[in-house]
Image (tube, coloured by chain):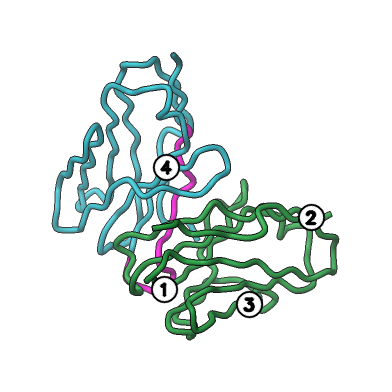
């Protein structure tokens, strides 16, 4: 099976703009989680989607949002970008909302100037 | 919020040596997992150990869990240059945060 794919791989934006990142899970996986990784804060959980519904949300401001489509593909959106949003955004999928094994994509590197 | 703390933050060894990384956490957990990350790329799941297990093996990996001390260790035996990566522990507390990751140990294996 193909792995988790994320697009784009690299992105450069300026402060105040918004950005949309995409994640395609492994075929058959219906749960998608998003994480933000920064040198200062490390890996932090953003949110989890299952069957097009947000199940859990981490401690991030409302500027961070996401959604999941009927084919399990997921997008996350960050509005009004700040310099501190520069990070590697990782998507992970699993068959069901279980944390037993999550399969991570290669990530999207977002740079905010 | 960070749950796990890996120790050491960085480790440099020679090929063939064993590498031991430790992880401490603060609250009770359902399971603890170890992941590897190569230079700013995605994470690869290595091994999961449940709260009622004390030791688990997978190939050259050995993981122990001591719930009374709230700590875990990852041992990589006979290390190879290809093991060079950052290693993270992640805990599942059964709450809304899914996996909570530590800050990782950066392992360098010199050929």
* Pointers 3 and 4 within a single chain: no
Q: Which chain is cyan?
A: B
Residue B52, image quadrant = bottom left
Name the secondary structure under disc 1. Answer: strand
Residue A80, image quadrant = bottom right
Which chain is mark 1 on?
A: A
**Mark seen at residue A12:** 2
* B99 drawn magenta: yes
Q: Which residues are magenta?
A: B93-106
Q: Mark 3 or 1 closer to N-term? A: 1
For disc 4, the neighbor class at 10 Å (few under 14, some 14 to 19, many from 20) is many
Q: Majority secondary structure of the magenta segment?
A: loop
**Mark seen at residue B36:** 4
CA gap, disc 1 to disc 4?
21 Å
For disc 1, the neighbor class at 10 Å (few under 14, some 14 to 19, many from 20) is many
Name the secondary structure under disc 3. Answer: strand
Task: Quickly name the residue at label 3.
Answer: A65
Task: Quickly name the residue at label 1.
Answer: A31
- Expressed as whole percent of the image width and height from the top left, the position of residue B5 reads 42, 46
Which chain is mark 4 on?
A: B
CA gap, disc 3 to disc 2?
19 Å
């Amino acid at each position: 099976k193909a792995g988790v794919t994320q697009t784009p791989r690299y992105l450069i934006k300026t402060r105040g703009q918004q950005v949309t990142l995409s994640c395609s899970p492994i075929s058959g996986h219906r749960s998608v989680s998003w994480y933000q990784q920064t040198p200062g804060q490390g890996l932090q959980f953003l949110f989890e989607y299952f069957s097009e519904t947000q199940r859990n949300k981490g401690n991030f401001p409302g500027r961070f949002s996401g959604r999941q489509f009927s084919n399990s593909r997921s997008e996350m959106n960050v509005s009004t970008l700040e310099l501190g949003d520069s990070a590697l955004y990782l998507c992970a999928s699993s068959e069901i909302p279980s944390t037993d094994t999550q399969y991570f994509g290669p990530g999207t590197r977002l740079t905010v100037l | 919020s960070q749950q796990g703390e890996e120790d050491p933050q960085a480790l440099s060894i020679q090929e063939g040596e064993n590498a031991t990384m430790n992880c401490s956490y603060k609250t009770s957990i359902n399971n603890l997992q170890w992941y590897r990350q190569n230079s700013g790329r995605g994470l690869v799941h290595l091994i999961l150990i449940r709260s009622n297990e004390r030791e688990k093996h997978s190939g050259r990996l050995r993981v122990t869990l001591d719930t009374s001390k709230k700590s875990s260790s990852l041992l990589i035996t006979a290390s190879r240059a290809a093991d060079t990566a950052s290693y993270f522990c992640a805990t599942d507390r059964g709450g809304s945060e899914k996996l909570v990751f530590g800050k990782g140990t950066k392992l360098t294996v010199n050929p």
